[in-house]
Amino acid sequence: MSDTSRTREEILVLAKTAGLDLPAEYFDELVDAYGHLQTMISRLPRNRARSDEPAHVFHATTFLPQEG
């Protein structure tokens, strides 16, 4: 795990904050999964400009035939 690893107690607080009230055996699975989640998050690119993300805007007029 990276330096952002959390203790079982911190994960318990996160789970309670999210409204999860898990039995002990499920909580153990959550703790194990959290370590994998942190690994996946660490692989996400950081410090990208807003312009790197498309605007997701559709302008129908862009696709009209050009007069000419």
Image: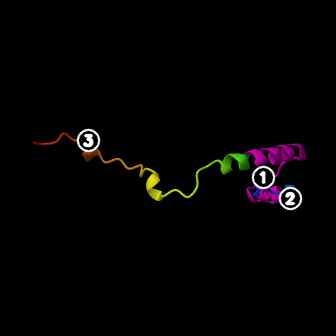
Q: Which residue is nearer to you in this view: 65 or 35?
A: 35
Q: Which mark is residue 35?
A: none
Position above or below: 54 against 65: below
Counting residues from the N terminus, which is met first, the one under dot 1 or under dot 2?
Answer: 2
Q: Which residue is nearer to you in this view: 38 or 66?
A: 38
Query: Do residues under tags 3 and 1 come within 8 Å of each other at their CB atoms?
Result: no
58 vs 1, left or right, is: left
- Display coloring: rainbow
What's the amino acid at mark 1? Leu
Give the image location of residue 47, x and y in percent. 55, 58
Residue identifier under label 2? 9
Counting residues from the N terminus, which is met first, the one under dot 2 or under dot 3?
Answer: 2
SS at circle 1: loop
Residue at the spot 82% in from the left edge and 52% down from the top edge: 21
Main SS of the magenta segment?
Answer: helix
Give the residues drawn in magenta, as a range. 10-36
Q: Is residue 26 magenta?
A: yes
Residue identifier under label 1? 20
Give the image location of residue 31, x and y in percent. 82, 48
Q: Judge the density around disc 3: few (<14), some (14-19), many (≥20) Cα neighbours within 10 Å.
A: few
Give the image location of residue 29, x and y in percent. 83, 43
Q: Alpha-carbon distance for marks 2 and 3?
A: 55 Å
Q: Which mark is residue 63?
A: 3
